[in-house]
Image: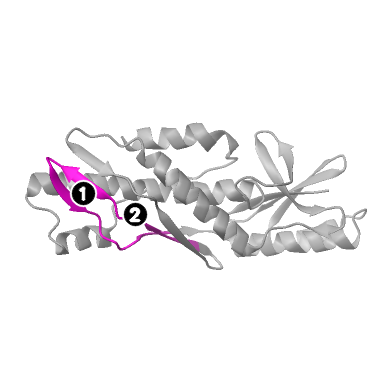
Amino acid sequence: MKKRAQVTIFIIIGLIILALIFFGVYFRKEIKETLMERAIFKGIVVEENVREAVNYISNCINDVSDLAVTYVLAQGGWIKPRYYFEYYPLLVGYWKYGDKDTSPTLETIKKEMEDFVNFYVEECMADFYREKLIIIRVTPETKIEIKPNKIIFDVSYPAIILFNNVTYKVPDTPFHYEKDAELVGVYNAGKKIIDMELKNSNYVDLTYMGDLGYDVTRLPFGRDTLYLITGKTTQLLFATR
């Protein structure tokens, strides 16, 4: 059923992901131990079924968190940019429009990723089905912390699990997930490109871009330009005009 949940996500947004690397997901030890300590599991059969439900929640959160980073950065830092260059099927947000810097802040990008996770975790959970096992869904609450080389997701999802008419509550402790990501680095490289264009939009200093520390691909489209900045773990795409 985990695959079925993933299919729902990929149908909705899979076509707009340029490159997606799936990391193995697992039921984290601290969550399992917390459930055991709170005596939620009562008997082997119940323990295995309830563990399966919590494992499903954890897998949804991990997969959607991965997708949030790839998707939002493929659209310039937004879920749906207000101003964008349509590079089908992407809507690539402008970081420069005319003589103005229109790039998002890191805080904006973080908020967009949080909103993405909150929405698509619910979509993922909608596909959960087991006989005699029900998860009463709740609205996720995602908090993201951006570090230089990783993004930390803490997602609160205190759902109620029903099994054979017995009620179990998922602990209030947030599900924790960390993703290796050079978001700060590729973002700063993008800002330097914007500064370069604002100084002289008619001249492209390829040497300068080569010294940014990342692979930079520049794709001109008439008066618009796409920039793809590629690091070891992270890609950022944005447009300028």
Residue identified by numbered label 2: 157
Residue 165 is inside the magenta segment: yes
Mark pair 1, 2: CA separation: 15 Å
Percent position of residue 46, x then y: 12, 46
Residue 232 is inside the magenta segment: no
**Point 53% across, 37% down: residue:** 13
- Left or right placement of residue 92 versus residue 170 in this view: right
- The magenta segment is 151-177
Q: Secondary structure at mark 2?
A: loop
Q: Amino acid at mark 2?
A: Tyr
Residue 88 against residue 176 in the figure, above or below: above
Q: Which of pointers 1 and 2 indicates the residue nearer the eye?
A: 2
Q: Amino acid at mark 1?
A: Arg
Question: Foreground residue, 95 or 187?
Answer: 95
**Point 66% across, 61% down: residue:** 187
In the displayed orientation, state which residue is furthest to the bottom.
148
Q: Residues within 10 Å of mark 1 (few under 14, many from 20)?
A: some
Residue 184 falls in which quadrant of the image? bottom right
Residue identified by numbered label 1: 51
- Left or right placement of residue 130 versus residue 110 in this view: left
